[in-house]
Image (cartoon, helix red, strand yellow):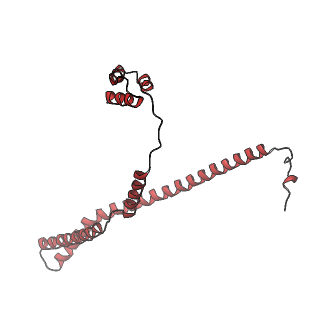
């Protein structure tokens, strides 16, 4: 094991200097870790954007091929001996059935969506705890101090009309006159 006293310059440094040095090094380490995390996140976001753009381009190309495939299917059915109009109606009917099937699957998935029960329970629990909590008592403020801070003549008239009431009564009068 090494002796900390053997390091060069360690005898010259006080405990305060050592703590300051450790704090500065720790701060630099934290800043470097944050910079590294930012760089990693930036790289992941860039990859995600490129991947999303690729999926969007593939979707657009697939969308553009749908009319061509529809015409090919209709003309293929026509070559089997059916009239051209009937061939196009069969292809259109197939698309309608496919859309209905996909819509039905989507509807079933939407019906399975439930409210976030854990979050609601946590929010209710927090609300219950906050309702039971008593507010920190605040010192009462004299009516004269309130009047001085507000600078309102209406407040002064309200206190004067309270006529000799206690400080709490004066404060209530001020509160009523300003609302």
Asked whether 168 or 37 is in front, the reply is 168
Residue 156 image-quadrant placement: top left
Query: From what the image shows, is residue 145 above or below residue 49?
Result: above
- Identify which residue, 69 or 130, lies in the foreground: 130
Give the percent coordinates (x, y) of residue 99: 23, 68
Residue 148: horizontal and vertical position, in percent? 44, 22
The residue positioned 56% from the left and 56% from the top of the image is: 40
Q: Is residue 1 left or right of residue 125?
A: right
Task: Look at 45% across and 31% down and name the residue there.
Answer: 141
The spot of residue 86 in percent (x, y) is 12, 73
Left or right of 118: which side holds 9? Answer: right
Q: Residue furthest bottom?
A: 80
Rendering coords of residue 69 (x, y %): 26, 69
Residue lying at 25% horizontally and 68% vertically, measured from the top left: 107
Q: Quadrant of residue 56?
A: bottom left
In this rendering, position of residue 113 left or right of residue 47:
left
Quadrant placement of the N terminus:
bottom right
């Amino acid at each position: 094991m090494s002796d900390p006293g053997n390091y060069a310059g360690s005898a010259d440094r006080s405990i305060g200097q050592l703590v300051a040095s450790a704090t500065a090094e720790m701060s630099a380490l934290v800043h470097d870790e944050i910079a590294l995390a930012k760089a990693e996140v930036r790289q992941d976001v860039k990859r995600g954007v490129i991947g999303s753009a690729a999926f969007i381009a593939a979707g657009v190309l697939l969308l553009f091929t749908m009319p061509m495939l529809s015409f090919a299917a209709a003309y293929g059915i026509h070559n089997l001996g059916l009239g051209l109009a009937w061939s196009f109606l069969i292809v259109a009917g197939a698309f309608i059935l496919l859309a209905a099937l996909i819509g039905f699957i989507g509807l079933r998935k939407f019906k399975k969506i439930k409210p976030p029960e854990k979050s609601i329970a946590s929010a209710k629990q927090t609300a219950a705890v906050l309702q039971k909590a008593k507010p920190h008592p605040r010192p009462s403020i004299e009516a004269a101090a309130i009047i001085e801070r507000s600078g309102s003549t209406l407040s002064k008239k309200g206190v004067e009309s309270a006529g000799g009431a206690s400080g709490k009564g004066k404060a209530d009068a001020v509160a009523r006159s300003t609302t």
